[in-house]
Image (cartoon, rainbow, N blue to C red):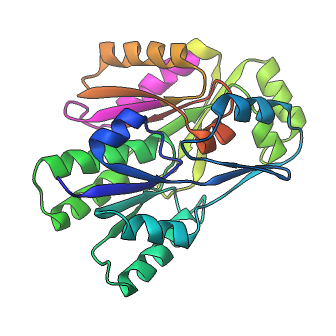
């Protein structure tokens, strides 16, 4: 099976999954003030999260350069690329530029998917591509099937710490403090067009879990032959709790629990979880 998959590092994936699925990850960069962290295999996650917790300024990130995408495409047998939502990052646009440069050098035939999502959503798409490759579908069939899959996919995330939203100006410090003080859980996620929307306001963890189950139910999706991905930042216990509840109520083919990588951890922050199905 030669069709490899290139992803950006917002795709949360374990080393074992990378090896099995033939996934190549192109790193984003996280910035805490003047300090830069490359989101690749060398990242010390413990050290990064410690620095993030202590940092009081604005945090930011940078997409992989077009050259990094060009290099990944030219140095591999990849036929598919999956990126962060083009509404949230320049990763998709840079992948397109890198692919065009690779095509000028004779490396053609690569299709780039805008995930319209992030984190667990990208992971779910990569898994879908891998399964379709294994099933023996032609490339054109895979492309059409995955685009339809992206259009119907749901991604939700819940944060326990709202500091980074406040640091980025997306939420005032006062609002963030009140949310945590009152134990409010906001279920946010993709709006279907690649941007973030607020879906539910919940009073505590138990209510949040019930609402996540209700969102799966109301999606109308047939879960029997589908996968569900739960990414978490230092919150394996909550991920397992959610997996148990989902297993009791629905019939997903497989549920993956995966630790967040650097860029997902930057925005999900400590104890955050992301769910995609």
Q: Write down the region rendered in magenta.
A: 207-230
Q: Residue at left 38%, top 66%?
A: 75
Whether the magenta-drawn stretch holds residue 226 is answered as yes
Say whether residue 146 is left or right of residue 260: left
Residue 52 position, x and y percent, is 78, 35
Q: Quadrant of the C terminus?
A: top left
Camera sees residue 104: yes
Residue 264 position, x and y percent, is 59, 41
Q: Quadrant of residue 154?
A: top left
Q: Residue at left 27%, top 74%?
A: 109
Residue 251 position, x and y percent, is 24, 23
Which residue is most to the left? 136
Q: Residue at left 38%, top 71%?
A: 74
Whether the magenta-drawn stretch holds residue 131 is answered as no
* 220 shown above or below 82: above
Q: Residue at left 31%, top 60%?
A: 147
Q: Quadrant of residue 234?
A: top right
Say whether residue 186 is left or right of residue 22: right
* 119 shown above or below 269: below
């Amino acid at each position: 099976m030669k069709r490899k998959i290139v992803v950006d590092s917002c795709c949360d994936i374990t080393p074992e999954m990378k090896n099995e699925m033939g996934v190549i990850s192109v790193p984003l960069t996280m910035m805490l003030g003047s300090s830069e962290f490359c989101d690749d295999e060398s990242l010390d996650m413990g050290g990064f999260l410690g620095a993030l917790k202590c940092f009081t300024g604005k945090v930011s990130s940078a997409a992989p350069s077009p050259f990094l995408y060009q290099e990944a495409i030219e140095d591999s047998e990849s036929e598919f690329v999956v990126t962060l939502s083009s509404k949230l990052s320049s990763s998709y646009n840079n992948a397109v530029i890198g692919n065009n440069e690779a095509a000028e050098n004779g490396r053609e035939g690569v299709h780039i998917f805008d995930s319209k999502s992030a984190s667990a959503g990208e992971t779910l798409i990569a898994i879908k591509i891998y399964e379709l490759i294994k099933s023996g579908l032609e490339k054109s069939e895979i492309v059409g099937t995955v685009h339809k899959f992206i259009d119907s996919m749901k991604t939700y995330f819940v944060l326990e710490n709202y500091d980074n939203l406040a640091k980025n100006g997306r939420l005032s410090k006062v609002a963030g403090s009140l949310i945590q003080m009152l134990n409010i859980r906001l279920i946010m996620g993709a709006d279907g067009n690649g941007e973030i929307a607020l879906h539910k306001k919940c009073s505590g963890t138990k209510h949040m879990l019930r609402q996540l189950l209700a969102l799966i139910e109301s999606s109308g999706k047939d879960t029997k032959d589908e996968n569900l991905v739960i990414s978490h930042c230092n919150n394996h216990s909550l991920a397992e709790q959610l997996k148990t509840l989902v297993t009791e109520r629905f019939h997903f083919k497989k549920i993956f629990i995966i630790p967040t990588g650097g860029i997902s951890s930057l925005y999900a922050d400590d104890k955050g979880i992301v769910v995609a199905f």
